[in-house]
Amino acid sequence: MTQPTTPPGTPRAEIDLGEAQVRALLRTQHPDLSGLALERIDAGWDNIMFRLGDEFCLRFPRRRVAAALLDNEQRWLPVIAATLPIPIPTPLRIGRPGHGYPWNWSVIPWLPGRTADLDPPHSAEAIRFAAFLRALHRPAPPDAPENEFRGVPLRDRQQSVEERMQRVAAHIELIATPIRSLWEIALAAPIDGNDRWLHGDLHPRNVLVSDQRITGIIDWGDITSGDVATDLASIWMLFAKRGDREQALNAYGEVSEATLQRARGWAVFFGIVLLDTGLIDNPRHAEVGRRTLLRVAEDG
């Protein structure tokens, strides 16, 4: 049997930095901000985050590949932000390498709320979220960022997803048949629209919610152009009720049956990836993955 080649778990950081190093960068490059309270709040797959005072957040890549993604955020978020009905963390200032830190970094606005896996949005937010997706999914320019992992034909991700399916088979035994069927249908579905702006990684930990209202869409490192089905998959990740998901899809506007098939396939993709990586070292990701797979199987 061929051994899986897709690595499990959260990618290892290539660099870490502490408060003293961050303070030094601020004193050198943004001295007017250097006296504000500083608190490390999170580290994801790609970035380390610090809250700065009441109004700001600092975003530092923790892997070389993420440095290029952050450069994309710095260039393109100011271009798309004005037309979006939900706030996004458009960079306010750009930081440069220094004091032993090798990459560009960002000062972004602090957006209130908890992530949607902990604080799900109200059913009424389904329509508002659909309006956000519709506003985002406008034609992208030819020089939009390329991303080999998002917005691409699902067949480009087939090997890695099916390796992960093999690893998590015991955890999705009850829904294995519908999930595999939906995946196969999605792989065969033609792409009938392309080259639209995409967030690329719209899982619940990249959606902020306060008082059941969506307050921000964060972590735009995977911004790219491509198949809108990639982002439509977020509807299954965010909304627990089947009626809310139907409402969101209807509010988004007319989509082809092939696009819906691919969207379900991307929901399978995210569900499998989050479950697989989460079972290693991130229970919150695992739970998002499990819920997503159950929901897409229910609707399929």
Image: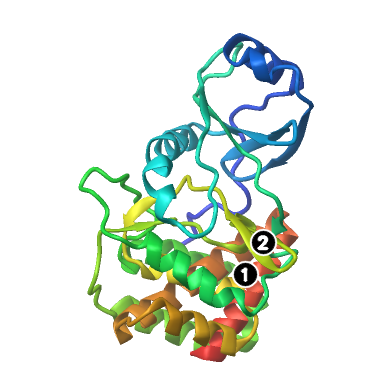
Disc 1 to disc 2, C-alpha distance:
6 Å
Question: In the rendered view, does 118 fall on the left or right side of 146?
Answer: right
Instruction: Give neighbour class at mark 2: few <14, some 14-19, many 20+ (Cα, 10 Å).
Output: many
Q: Position of residue 76 (x, y in %)?
A: 38, 41
Look at mark 2 in the image and give the residue it sits on.
Answer: 285
Q: Residue furthest left?
A: 142
User: Is residue 1 among the parts visible in the rendering?
Assistant: no
Along the line of sight, the residue nearer the viewer: 65 or 202 = 202
Q: Position of residue 190 (x, y in %)?
A: 24, 77
Disc 1 residue type?
Gly
Question: In the rendered view, does 261 fall on the left or right side of 298?
Answer: left
SS at badge 1: helix
SS at badge 2: helix
Q: Position of residue 37 (x, y in %)?
A: 79, 26
Mark seen at residue 189: none
Instruction: Give neighbour class at mark 1: few <14, some 14-19, many 20+ (Cα, 10 Å).
Output: many
Q: Residue at x 36, y 43 (%)?
A: 79
Q: Residue at x 74, y 61 (%)?
A: 283
Q: Residue at x 31, y 47 (%)?
A: 146
Question: In the rendered view, does 174 fall on the left or right side of 129?
Answer: right
Q: Quadrant of residue 122?
A: bottom right
Q: Position of residue 178 (x, y in %)?
A: 51, 89
Mark seen at residue 289: 1
* Position of 91 relative to 161 (above/below): above
Q: Answer yes or no: do the residues labelled 1 and 2 have beta carbons within 8 Å?
A: yes
Along the line of sight, the residue nearer the viewer: 202 or 272 = 202
The scheme the figure's colours follow is: rainbow
Disc 2 residue type?
His
Q: Quadrant of residue 40?
A: top right
User: Is residue 3 among the parts visible in the rendering?
Assistant: yes
* Position of 226 relative to 299 (above/below): above
* Position of 41 relative to 23 (above/below): below
